[in-house]
Amino acid sequence: MVGKKVIITGVPGVGKTTVVNEALQKLKSEGIEYQSINFGTFMFEVAKKDNVVENRDQMRSLDRTVQKRLQQRAAQEIAKISGNVLIDTHASVKTPKGYLAGLPEWVLRELMPDIIVLVETDDDQILMRRLTDETRTRDKEGSRSIGEHQQFNRSIAAAYAMLTGCTIKIIMNPDFLLERSSSELADVLR
Ligand code: AP5
């Protein structure tokens, strides 16, 4: 079956997983099914097998060549999945040595998305969400730095559109408006 391939991105803590879960719930009630894939989980499984990390937040600090190998293997596995697929990942990853493209050419060639979604919200709201999420080891950074990351993601998304011919959709996910953001994502996925 030929399905839709949609990639959803956003800086850590913007709420992309939350928006995805709400949107998929709405679609399920209409009989529209998507396989929801977390790219980081695929990378983490490979990283654990290779004994290079103990938790998923350590992956950002691995050597660039190791991250590239993990990306490649995750992309190859995900490419085998057919039907409607929604891939939760990152347009770019903030590493100690600078921004790393989340969807470089060797990943895009495998995935060939129809649409890339950028989930965004105000920088200070993201900061607050990170500070109140105790389940993860978030990087410590201020709202100005989060703003720079969101801006970088828009720029790099333009390059992804040039490479693949996919469309880029920006969805805002502000506090108290989850219903609106998830409806917008459901519209993209229909
Ligand atoms: P990943 O698993 O994607 O982790 P993450 O970036 O930290 O993303 P999260 O899923 O934790 O955050 P989220 O934005 O989905 O927010 P959430 O819904 O939880 O990636 C893990 C690692 O894998 C990366 O660090 C990287 O190393 C690696 N990786 C992945 N893809 C890669 C790639 N392509 N290349 C290289 N490496 C890659 O929500 C956060 C909080 O906000 C929650 O408390 C939630 O309740 C709240 N919230 C959400 N929406 C709202 C709202 N509207 N109003 C109020 N609160 C809200």
Image: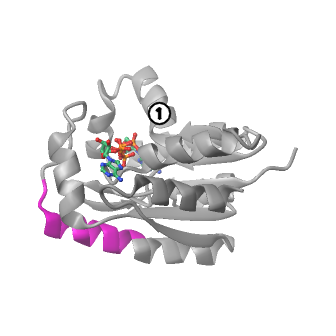
Mark 1: C-beta under 8 Å from nearest atom of ligand 1: yes
- Disc 1 residue type (three-letter): Thr
In magenta, the rendered stretch is 141-153
Q: Position of residue 172 (x, y in %)?
A: 41, 66
Relative horizontal placement of residue 6, taking residue 102 as reference (left or right): right
Under circle 1, the secondary element is: helix
Q: Position of residue 73 (x, y in %)?
A: 57, 39
Relative horizontal placement of residue 99, taking residue 190 as reference (left or right): left
Q: Residue at x 45, y 72 (%)?
A: 156
Q: Which residue is mark 1?
A: 41
Relative horizontal placement of residue 148, taking residue 154 as reference (left or right): left
Q: Which image quarter has ligand 1? A: top left
Q: Residue at x 57, y 63 (%)?
A: 116
Tell me the quadrant of the picture where the C terminus can be found: bottom right
Tell me the quadrant of the picture where the N terminus can be found: top right
Q: Position of residue 91 (x, y in %)?
A: 44, 61
Of helix, strand and loop, which mostly describes the magenta segment?
helix
Residue 121 sits in quarter: bottom left
